Image (cartoon, coloured by chain):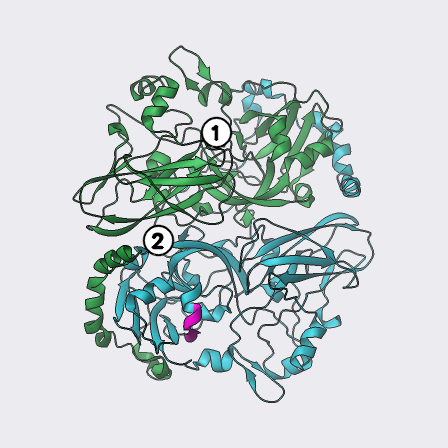
Chain colours: A cyan, B green
């Protein structure tokens, strides 16, 4: 701790020296004298009436890149709703009047039901903080295609919100699921009618029909007015614009689960029904495309998560994976939610490769890229030659800091 | 629980009956047949490109009323940043370029320092969920003035966010507080230079210099780019646009703590330095101005908080305070943060008076209005005749539900 303070003092030495001379020039008088001379202080900026619905400062310009959320700009664990990643199954994004929207539950049930949104909201509700992540989150173009540079490009398809809604189990019990109802098919109101299979066990466990995100109604890109939330499961199973739940007796092999969201193996078969997202993490500062101003103290910071439950531990390496040390976890650590980790680092100015590694409450450990290749029996070249994208890729992400302070994506060198 | 389900079934009976007839007319085919006939489904709404920085649905219209946040529209515990309550000490709200902004720490310190915003961000950071509340939150116009109707008007000066920043103790240690430095005066960059005294004990305990709110930089109305956060203490001590901290040897009796934010007593003296906010709670549904559609099941929902720490218990009464029952608390319950409570209620259709009562982790219990009057030795008439507003008013808020289903503010009858 003392070492850290010494190092921090180094970077603020300039500030400290400046202070003495600047005290007078800033003309900051004592608090007691604020009663006089108010007019000496210039009004900062143009006149501004507080708007009924606020906007961010004009000096804040962080934006999504296509579907990708700017993880490098986030603090804490809550993703600003306006910057939540978004993957859409068919454009345009629906613009639904909630008064017209209906949710139907039918199929192998005793009482088929159609709910208005207001009726859904009358049921007992819960609020929970959960991450969402696209199964195809990690962006791994290789070879002659443009490589991912920033953490927005490598991991920008994950976000985390406080969601509020009704346990799906309550709605299903109202309808009365028949003993033969072992699966359900959930369908959204996009014109392409995105639909996907969910086993009844998950539906009765912690699945929710949500209508609010971070305190206000779900944003349009996130499924307004109703969304199915299957905590910890790949994003594609969290059906937006939810309008129909059909209780059935087997998985339905919809387009999205049989072709798009699968991993093709070298033997020609595909990995199907990879519901749960694996332990994962990424350092968001420093990360690709950023530049460190010089040696000294830095707080390494990032996000970790696991679809299986809570994050138990995050380790950070600053030497390319040779040695690892525990990072601090932001409390409280929540189940199936982003967990912010922080690690004090005194950079000596030499080349360094930074990685983070997540272990979840079940003891599952985030693998290195080499371990993923060994487990799956495929190499990046294989991924490139098939779909140019891989589902459920959760390898530790290396960032190389050069002596000049630039930060580069080193996944291809690992 | 069975009773609740019976009652809920009553309100969805209409939906259930409707379902049978509507199944065909909605022409919802099975999931398997979604591969054909896609064009039968009309595209809902105009074309829409996902914006780089999202906006809410055009069907969501909740807004602030002046300074007051629409608590009746919130879900969970996170307040949408765009709807956070805002009290400003001097208009216009500053429009600060963060590259130009500085934070100075001086006075009784070994090393006076001036920080840029980027320098502040380089220090070790923490993120915490905390409420803010204006000391004058409860709106209590009486007599011939217009009475508060909605929960937005009665309690709309409280909000809750995930804040990220640097512990103030770290910055003060960098400057080196002299033994005689027992207080500090914090000053904002508004042209009125809002300033207020903070005892060193709080500064070294859990005070933060924050730069982010709900994942993104603090909103302009909340103090962009830097704000002092004094968790659990009255809003006025959470100085926005923080530009100066002067370490001093006594409280400075600034305008805001000596006149505006004080309670005048009948003996002509004022209550000063009421830093900490008392245990408080309010039911947000059903609340004033809303209308229940008829007898049946409703989930009563609201917010509770205490400046002293975590909420331990919230009780709800549906009979004007004669009997009380425990509400469910949204987990995890966080210290000095809003806590969402929920209570299943089967309304029999007769007049009912709903109240909530908060007990915090120290055993402090939210009082009734009569208890507040007894404690302070003043009545509402007295408050009216002096400032027409009272600081730190935390009485249990009664909402009267009439047989017609309208919900009225019953504070004046309690």
Screen quadrant of the N terminus of chain A: top right
Screen quadrant of the C terminus of chain A: bottom right
Residue farthest to the bottom, as pictured: A267
**Residue A323 placed where, x, y %?**
78, 60
Query: Dividing the picture into quarters, in which one does residue B28 lie?
Result: bottom left
- In the structure shown, which secondary structural element does the residue marked by tag 2 occupy? loop
**Residue at x 61% of width, y 70% of height:** A139
What is the crowding at mark 1: few (fewer than 14 residues within 10 Å), some, or many (at least 20)? some
Q: Is residue A139 above or below residue B376?
A: below
Q: Which residue is mark 1?
A: B89
Say whether residue B337 is magenta: no
- Which is more toward the observer, A132 or B205? B205
Q: Is residue B27 left or right of B170 when viewed as pictured?
A: left
- In the structure shown, which secondary structural element does the residue marked by tag 1 occupy? loop
Name the disc covering residue B60, or none.
2
Determine the chain carrying the residue at label 2: B
**Residue at x 83% of width, y 56% of height:** A350
Determine the chain carrying the residue at label 1: B
Number of marks: 2
SS majority, magenta: strand
Q: Is residue A229 above or below residue A269?
A: above
Residue range in magenta is A195-202
């Amino acid at each position: 701790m003392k070492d850290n303070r010494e190092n921090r003092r180094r970077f603020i030495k300039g500030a400290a020296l400046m202070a003495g001379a600047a005290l007078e020039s800033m003309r900051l008088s004592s608090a007691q004298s604020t009663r006089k001379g108010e007019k000496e202080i210039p009004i900062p900026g143009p006149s501004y009436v507080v708007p009924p619905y606020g906007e961010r400062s004009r000096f804040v310009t962080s934006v999504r890149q296509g579907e990708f959320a700017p993880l490098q700009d986030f603090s804490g664990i809550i993703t600003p709703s306006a910057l939540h990643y978004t993957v859409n199954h068919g454009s345009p994004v629906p613009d639904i009047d909630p008064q017209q929207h209906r949710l139907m539950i039918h199929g192998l049930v005793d009482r088929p039901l159609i709910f208005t949104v207001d009726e859904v909201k009358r049921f007992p509700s819960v609020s929970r903080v959960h991450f969402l992540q696209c199964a195809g989150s990690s962006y791994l173009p290789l070879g002659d295609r443009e490589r991912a540079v920033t953490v927005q490009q490598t991991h920008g398809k994950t976000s985390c919100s406080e969601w509020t809604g009704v346990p799906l189990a309550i709605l299903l019990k109202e309808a009365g699921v028949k003993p033969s109802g072992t699966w359900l098919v959930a369908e959204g109101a996009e014109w392409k009618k995105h639909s996907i299979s969910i086993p009844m066990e998950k539906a009765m466990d912690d699945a929710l029909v949500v209508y609010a995100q971070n305190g206000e109604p779900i944003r349009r890109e996130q499924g307004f007015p109703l969304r199915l939330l299957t905590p910890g499961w790949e994003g594609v199973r969290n059906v937006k614009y939810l309008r129909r739940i059909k209780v059935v007796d087997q998985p339905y092999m919809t387009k999205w689960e049989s072709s798009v969201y699968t991993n093709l193996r070298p033997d020609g078969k595909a990995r199907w029904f990879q519901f749960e997202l694996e332990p994962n993490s990424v350092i968001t500062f420093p990360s690709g495309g950023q530049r460190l101003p010089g040696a000294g103290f830095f707080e390494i910071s990032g996000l970790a998560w696991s679809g299986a439950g809570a994050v138990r531990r995050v380790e950070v390496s600053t030497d390319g994976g040779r040695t690892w040390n525990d990072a601090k976890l932001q409390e409280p650590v929540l189940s199936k939610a982003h967990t912010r980790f922080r690690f004090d680092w005194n950079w000596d100015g030499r080349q360094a490769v930074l990685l983070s590694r997540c272990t979840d409450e079940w003891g599952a450990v985030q693998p290195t890229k080499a371990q993923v290749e060994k487990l799956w029996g495929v190499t990046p070249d294989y991924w490139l030659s098939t779909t140019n994208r891989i589902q459920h890729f959760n390898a530790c992400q290396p960032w190389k800091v050069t002596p000049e302070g630039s930060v580069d994506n080193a996944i291809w060198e690992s």
